[in-house]
Image (tube, rainbow, N blue to C red):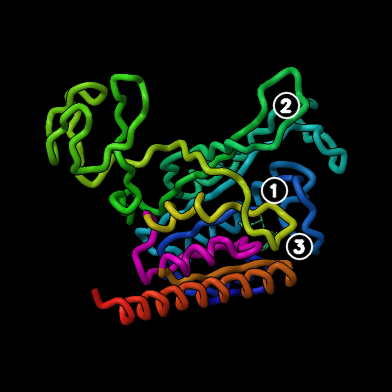
């Protein structure tokens, strides 16, 4: 595990090429939060300047990624004029949705990135809004990008159980390989009911691109952190065990903690020294928790030979 306290671009430039399996990160959002440190990204006076800085960082991420590597970016949108600290960017009117996530996605494509998917993070416990002329915003994006057209992606590691409808209209989990209420035989077979005609994979169904995960992350941080549960699939699909995960905007170290718990190596970068320390302590505590669990399991096995 390596954590660097410094500017993402400057630190990435010191790192060797082609060494990282996957990068899982959430950059500072445009004018959402002042992290109170010189050199921070996010407080640029126009969206174009902000996107240009992020593009430069992700150009270095490209260099350090292996040729079969992937990049997962969690980013949210906001409305023009919602924050009086910056002047209205040219071409935007107050109340316009800025489309920041898509500006970034479209800026990365000509850099060589393959824009593979827009995953929707659906937040069932989103912040209420007092708006009366639109719906309450309850989602953010996770973009999956790759360096090459063919890349490492462990689709089986993130499969989900099938669900089928019972006659009463209730949903019911269908564990792969088990008979459902529709009498699905093992393995690939013609399915009746909802899945008529579709082959079933005994390992489960392919993960869908809308991920419902409640917000609420690490309690020690007073800034936006994503939940570990949100980014676990990115690590599982994007990095083999003992491979390396990168987060150039580490914050409180959520990606590092999840990587450790899933037995992946981790490289993290964070500009704010206070957050760096928080992340280091958190990731170290995660390691201890993991080792302690292993010890507990070993002791249980010794105490209970049956
Ligand atoms: C959205 S937060 C990341 C939160 C993180 N995913 C977590 O769960 O804790 C973005 C982070 O980027 C950091 N940051 C801002 N500008 C930076 C820069 N130039 N280089 C490195 N980190 C920077 C901020 O201090 C902040 O901690």
Left or right of 73 in this view: 7:
right
Q: Which residue is mark 2?
A: 96
Mark 1–mark 2 CB contact (< 8 Å): no
Specify the segment rendered in magenta.
237-262
Identify the secondary structure beneath mark 3.
loop
- Tag 1, which secondary structure? helix
Q: Which residue is mark 3?
A: 39
Q: Quadrant of residue 20?
A: bottom left
Number of the front mark, 1 or 2: 2
The location of residue 256, given as percent across then percent down, is 53, 66
Vertical relation: 220 (above or below) 162: below
Question: Which quadrant holds residue 2?
Answer: bottom right
**Mark nearer the N terminus (1 vs 2):** 1
Residue at 80%, 63% (x, y): give it. Answer: 37
Q: Nearer the viewer, residue 252 or 13?
A: 252
The reply to whether the residue tagged 3 has its Cβ within 8 angstroms of ligand 1 is yes
Return the x and y of residue 245 as percentages of the image width and height.
46, 65
Residue 217 in view, yes or no? yes
Crowding around mark 1 (Cα neighbors within 10 Å: few <14, some 14 to 19, many 20+) is many
Mark on residue 50? 1
Q: CA distance from mark 2 to mark 3?
A: 28 Å
At a point 25% along the width and 78% down the height, the residue shown is 305
Q: Earlier in the sequence, mark 1 or mark 3?
A: 3
- N-term mark: 2 or 3: 3
294 vs 140, nearest the viewer: 294
Residue in the picture at 49% in, 51% down: 72
Residue 201 on image: x %, y %: 20, 41
Image quadrant of ligand 1? Answer: bottom right
Image side of residue 110 versus residue 159, left or right: right
Q: Disc 1 and disc 3: Cα gap in Å? A: 12 Å
| Residue at the spot 73% in from the left edge and 26% down from the top edge | 96
| Element type where label 2 sits in the image | loop
């Amino acid at each position: 595990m390596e954590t660097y306290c410094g500017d993402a671009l400057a630190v990435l430039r010191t790192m060797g090429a082609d060494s990282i399996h996957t990068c899982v990160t959430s950059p500072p959002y445009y004018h959402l939060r002042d992290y109170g440190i010189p050199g921070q990204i996010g407080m640029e006076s126009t969206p174009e300047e902000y996107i240009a800085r992020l593009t430069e960082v992700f150009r270095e991420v490209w260099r350090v990624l292996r040729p079969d590597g992937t990049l997962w970016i969690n980013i949210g949108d906001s409305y023009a004029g919602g924050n009086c600290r910056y002047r209205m960017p040219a071409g935007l009117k107050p109340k316009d949705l800025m489309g920041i996530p898509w500006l970034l996605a479209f800026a990365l494509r000509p850099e060589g990135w393959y824009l593979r998917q827009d995953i929707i993070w659906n937040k069932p416990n989103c912040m209420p809004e007092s708006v009366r002329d639109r719906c309450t915003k309850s989602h953010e994006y996770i973009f999956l990008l790759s360096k090459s057209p063919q890349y490492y992606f462990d689709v089986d590691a993130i499969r989900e159980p099938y669900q089928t409808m019972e006659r009463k209209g209730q949903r019911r989990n269908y564990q792969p390989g088990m008979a459902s209420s529709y009498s699905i035989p093992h393995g690939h077979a013609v399915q009746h009911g909802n899945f008529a005609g579709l082959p079933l994979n005994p390992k489960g169904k392919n993960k869908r691109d809308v991920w419902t995960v409640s917000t609420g992350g690490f309690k020690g941080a007073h800034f936006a952190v994503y939940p570990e549960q949100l980014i676990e699939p990115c690590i599982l699909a994007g990095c083999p065990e003992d491979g390396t995960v990168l987060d150039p905007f580490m914050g409180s170290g959520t990606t590092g903690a999840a990587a450790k718990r899933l037995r992946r190596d981790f490289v993290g970068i964070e500009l704010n020294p206070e957050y760096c320390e928080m992340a280091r302590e958190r990731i170290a505590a995660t390691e201890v928790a993991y080792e302690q669990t292993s010890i507990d399991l070993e002791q249980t096995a010794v105490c209970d030979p049956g």
